[in-house]
Image: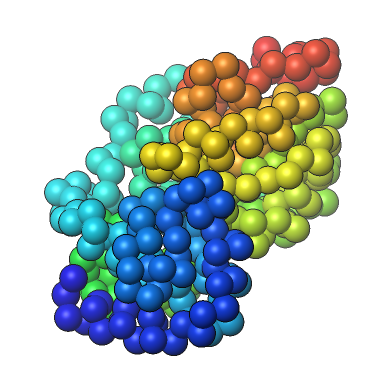
Amino acid sequence: MNETNAKLVEDLMISCIGCKRCLKACPSYANGGCDPYYVMHGWDGNVKACIGCGKCSEVCPATDPKTVMLHMKAEALGLPVPEAFVKYGYVIPPADPSWKEGLPEIPEGKDMYLLPGCIVNGRLPYLKYAAARAFQAVGVGIKELSDNKCCMYPIPLRSMTDVERNSVKYRMRNRMQGREAVTLCAGCCNEFARGGVYAPHVSTMLARYLERIRKLPGLKGLKVALEPGCSAERFMKDFEAVVRATGAEPVGNRYGCCGKNIPGVKDALMKERQEECADADVIVAGCPNCMVFYDAVPGGKPVIHLTELVALAAGDSETQMYHSLKIRSEDPRVSSMLSK
């Protein structure tokens, strides 16, 4: 760990008052994973099992455990800055452009910029189409910010100082030239905010247009489970409002962490999520990373992003072809919409 980061971590650790609220909030700890209290006191605490959800910092009254956890996990894993970041500005190489083949073309808009994020740019690029289609449906034009980069959240980038990481965010903000931006990932949204860059989560932006969403053809008959993702739980009011505006029916499930790919933790957490979503036709997620894991569960519940839900409400089911798990519904209204 470089000297600057080591000093930051030391200062944050010293500020811990030992209340242990972080333990009650941590989904990893609840399933035998990491112990944020131990980590905050300089002990191992199985920090490699940290999910990075940030719930520890949400409940902490005195310091910022999340920052400590991320830096300590990066140190424990010894991950270098990925070559993909040096070459592309993202920790994941971009997806092959052929993903666009067969999709209707949507004109670039001038109302706001899209900051797609690593997972969307590299693994779920079709969400760029879904976002453009969702905003087009409510009369808003979006355009991907040219030369956009990673939000700088990923663990491998923690070997950089905060000054170095924030400078990447500031350069993107400068290219926006005062125009609003939207993110598809709440983790990106939160990381930008930590650097003083305002780039709201898509649920916040779409919630501005609830009346317009209600006027779309809609999704009456579609039963949905809401799984915003850990970082998007703070936007749950907007998230649910957008879902209800489409006419879809929330089944009232509990929601929580998907477990990411953390050994010893992920299976128990994903089992919880699948069980609580059992009554739904589809899971609606606010986190692209969560989507990757939901879509990989054999025989699991189908998942779509919030932008895909709004696009579906507008009559566009184009992105369904990219999903391993397809939406199925016994309601003929929904089946008819999906077959278009």
Question: 12 left or right of 226?
Answer: left
Q: Is residue 307 left or right of residue 219?
A: left
Image quadrant where residue 6 sits: bottom left
- 65, 200: nearer the viewer: 65
Residue shown at the point (63%, 36%) measured from the top left: 272
Colour scheme: rainbow
Which corner quadrant holds the C terminus? top right
Nearer to me, 312 or 188: 188
Residue 332, image x, y percentages: 82, 13
Provide residue 215's location: percent of width, then percent of height: 83, 41
- Seen in the picture, residue 185 relative to 224 is either above or below; the reply is below
Q: How many marks?
A: 0
Between 266 and 131, the one lying in front of the other is: 266
Q: Is residue 106 visible?
A: no
Quadrant position of residue 115: bottom left
Coordinates of residue 137 in the picture (x, y in percent): 67, 41
Against 115, is 58 above or below?
below
Q: Position of residue 150 (x, y in %)?
A: 33, 56
Above or below: residue 108 compared with residue 314: below
Q: Is residue 232 visible?
A: yes
Q: Quadrant of the N terminus?
A: bottom left
Q: Residue at x 73, y 44 (%)?
A: 254
Residue at the spot 51% in from the left edge and 24% down from the top edge: 297
What residue do we see at 45% from left, 65% from top? 36
Q: Tell me: 43 left or right of 108.
A: left
